[in-house]
Amino acid sequence: MDAMTEDGHASNREQVLDALRDADKFVVISHEHPDGDALGSLVAMQEILTLLGKSSLMFIDSGDFPLPQEYSFLSLDGLIEAPPADVDQRTIVFLDCGNLERTPAAAFERAGANIINIDHHHDNTRFGNVNLVVPDASCTAEIVWDLMHGLGVKPTKTIAEALYIGLITDTGRFMYENTGARAHVMAAELIAAGVDVHDIYRRVYEDVPYGKLALLARGLANVERYDDGRLAVTTLSAEDFNDAGAEESYSEGVVDHLRSVRGTAVAALVRERLSNGDGRPAHKVSLRATDERVDVSRIAREQGGGGHRQAAGFDTAMSHDDLVAFLREQVAAQL
Ligand SMILES: [Mn+2]
């Protein structure tokens, strides 16, 4: 890749390419509540390995279904929802996972596991046997795209569409700070390989179920602003989801409406978990930074979460008042 700002990046890339070439059996896996980059990277890597003649399976936890409807058209060939019987013989490829806590993959953490870790989160814990962490990459799909070239694979339409979805969703359609010339070069190549830009736009950003709009209306109605608007917080309760007829994934994007407001330094969405009562905290907090002095991944890490400087998240059992007090304190400390 052009961006080699990290020590050892080139040798890590070669190590990962060797590991992908040498093994014959894989499981590809990503984080819980997979977003466009997680799913795009998974589907693309699955197809790349399959084209190389490897036996590859793609793991998505059964609890993550139904997938967000905007990605439901992606091909899920090779999907498994539980670890396969021969998991011990397979190399595990983690994509877009900053740490092992953000994956439903406890079953894959075992002694002697051979793990390849491919990611762009700057706070990645380097949990793999081989790690390719490229914080300058706009998305994990961009790293997969680079590896695809290294492996001599030509993008099929499936690969091109999957990588393009990772690219547009993680760059906010080429508008976020992480968007560089490389993202546009990648887009140009994927379009040449068969991506129908308008068709993907319609599938991912239009064709919105009404429940998503109804949930957004609630999210906008519940906004609270603190400290002259520097912190904007909105809340979606289980009742809001129910009243709106919304699925859990429909809250994706709500927080971005708050971030766009003048004077906002940090926007937060606090949503109640609808699924899995397996002892996890009841609320999930998504953070977005608008002020470049603020690193929201630092705030998330204080609570055991993680992410990027401008987008991060964590789970919490705090009361609403305690949570707001915590966020105000953390934002003030960084401004
Ligand atoms: Mn990503």
Image: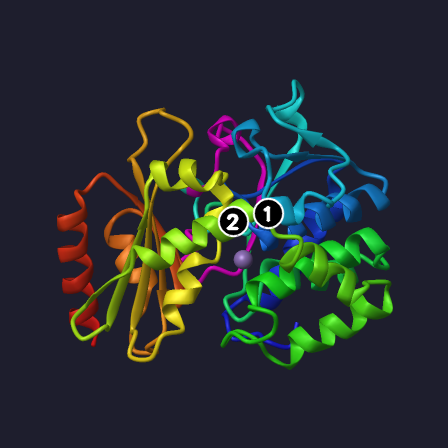
Please name the residue that numbered disc 2 is placed on: 212
Checking the image for residue 277, the label placed there is none
| 160 drawn magenta | no
Position of residue 55 relative to residue 324, above or below, is above
Is the CB of mark 2 within 8 Å of ligand 1?
Answer: no
The x, y position of residue 72, in whole percent, is: 68, 43
Residue matched to label 1: 209
Residue 21, compared with residue 177, is above or below; it is above
Q: Which residue is drawn at 32% across and 41% down?
A: 237
Q: Residue 155: percent from the left, percent from the top?
A: 83, 58
Say above or below: 174 vs 156.
below
Which color scheme is applied? rainbow
Q: Quadrant of ligand 1?
A: bottom right
Give the main secondary structure of the magenta stretch: loop
Residue 215 lies, in percent from the top left, at 44, 49
Q: Nearer the viewer, residue 139 or 69?
A: 69
- Magenta span has 108? yes
Which amino acid type corresponds to the residue marked 2 in the rendered image?
A: Lys
Task: Please name whichever residue, 302 or 91, is drawn nearer the observer in this view of the structure.
Answer: 302
Mark 1 element type: loop
Q: Which residue is drawn at 60% across and 53% down?
A: 36
Q: How far apart are marks 2 and 1 (CA)?
A: 6 Å
Quarter placement of the N terminus = bottom right
The type of residue carrying mark 1 is Pro
